[in-house]
Amino acid sequence: MAENGDRHSLEIYLGLGLLQGLTLLSVTEAWSSAGNDRAFLAGLLTFVLIGALQVQLLWERFREAQRWRLVSGCALLLAVLVAWFVWQSSPQDSLRWSDSSGSALLFGDLVLFYILTPFIQAWDSRSGGRFDYTALYRHAWNNGLILLLAALLVGLFWLLIALWAGLFSVVGINFFAALFFNRVFAWLSCALVFAMGVRIGLQRDQVIEALHGILLAICRALLPLTVLIVLLFVACLPFIGLEPLWRTKRAAAILLALVFAHLCLLNGVFQDGRQSPGYARSLRALVEASLLALPLLAALAGYALWLRVQQYGLTPSRVLVGLLVFMALLCAVAAAGAVLRRGDVWLGGLRRSNPPIALTLAVLLVLLQTPWFSPQELSAASQFRRLLAGQVAAGQFDAGLLRFRLGEPGRRYLARLEQLVEQPGALPPEQAAPLRADLQRLQQSKHYGEWQRNRREAEATTQLQPQWLGAPPENIEGLLARLAELSDCRRAACSLLAVDLDGDGVEEVLVICGEQRYPLPLPILARDPVRGWQQIGRLKQPVAGALSGVELAERIRREGFRRVAPRYQALEVGGVRFEPNLN
């Protein structure tokens, strides 16, 4: 009977894996030509993958109708979120799939799946409306390790497949390479092997327990290190101040990384609260002191983010960082509360606070993918309000962000902006004029990079005022835009000298910038018939007697210049040119 049940279980897992593989194959085959149906395909794929994976994790306890409804509801929720994400990503937002906010939202759906699954698995452990923390802890850790083991099995499988195909290809048999390295075999085999990996992880409790023990030992060994980092950093703050932290321009990211690393290691040591941490009393006191300092670090991360938002407004990435800051502050306050609320179990308050915090994160992840609270909607509204409130100058407003990076909400606010610009008296003249010019350039741009380039060219035309040492060459269109890309020209006034350096009858432009007496080489610009003005090289200046850009320009005005032929000429042998490189 045991063997029959085991065989039946294997057939179930392989069947679910085959269903996942066929769905993956069908969706990828139809994706390029799906057009407006991509949202449906993405939702269907998510529903099948997530639903089948949860069935695999819950199969032994999948006899109750309540669990069917919970699994179906979870898979349907994630399917709707992914379908909405794809639906609102029009072809104009093709970059959104690769930007940080889009990737973070898709990763957030995986986090949502990981959070909700243990609650479904521990549904029977509820008592008085509360879940048993031990059951939640066990399922959360086991799920992660089982999925890790399944992914490792897929990786090892493909290493052997690659070895198989490569070995026969060496002797001239390419049949196996053609058989294995195609979309059909790849999707089906990955799904089937992953399903077998999940089944192995569920059946081999001793393997999961061993991995669990190793990870907990690592957490126990590393937690004192993060304790030391937190305490030393907090102790140094009164002496060094916050200015060095702000100068990094990554203060929020650094502080959040420290807070979450410390909390992850702490929860690894705490486990479900039933085990002793294995630390001496003095070390436990240091751990408690570091937990009391965590709210300060989380608050500093929030303050750093607030400063950036006040200065530049919201962007999708800042909205997501705001979510992390809120969760860090919530977890830090809960950990500090566990220290202050003494009980029979060391830090026993974590047993009460961790489940609500996890569900809070799940709710926030769902809200961020709704039309009203999406990062694109919040960012577009923030940028639009800043412009109307005068917090950003009209000439510095990034209209391309609304059109190309903020999806449908950005285009909606851009349409409102266009109406205001065209409506007489709606905006002050000093705002309307530069905005109208920017909107005209925006209509001529096909993507965000082109918009930035067009805007740089316009800014270069108005901001750069180089002085010509003599008559300029013919057709200098685009020259100012190229000069704006040179850092020296952006920092100081430049002088330009038109001179035919190669004797072909067409003048190049020598760029002379800077006020410091450094032997800096002088950029040489030449006009390419196709690409326009390009930098082709630099004119070296001797170290001895080096002149600043201002001094050199003044000497050229006063004394003029002459072209000097090279002392050592090049050699050409059979069409190959040999240039001298002298010390």
Image (cartoon, rainbow, N blue to C red):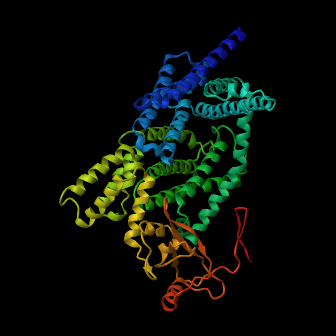
Extreme residue in the top direction? 1
Q: Is residue 237 above or below residue 274?
A: below
Q: Quadrant of residue 157?
A: top right
- Looking at the image, which is closer to me, 199 or 501? 501
* Residue 35 visible (yes or no): yes
Q: Quadrant of residue 158?
A: top right
Q: Is residue 221 left or right of residue 103?
A: right
Q: In which quadrant will I find the C terminus?
A: bottom right
Extreme residue in the left direction? 424
Extreme residue in the right direction? 171
Q: Is residue 399 left or right of residue 274?
A: left
Q: Position of residue 501 (x, y in %)?
A: 56, 76
Residue at the image position 47 percent from the left and 50 percent from the top:
326
Q: Position of residue 89 (x, y in %)?
A: 42, 40
* Residue 125 visible (yes or no): no
Q: Is residue 83 left or right of residue 216?
A: left
Q: Position of residue 253 (x, y in %)?
A: 55, 56
Q: Is residue 479 above or below residue 546?
A: above
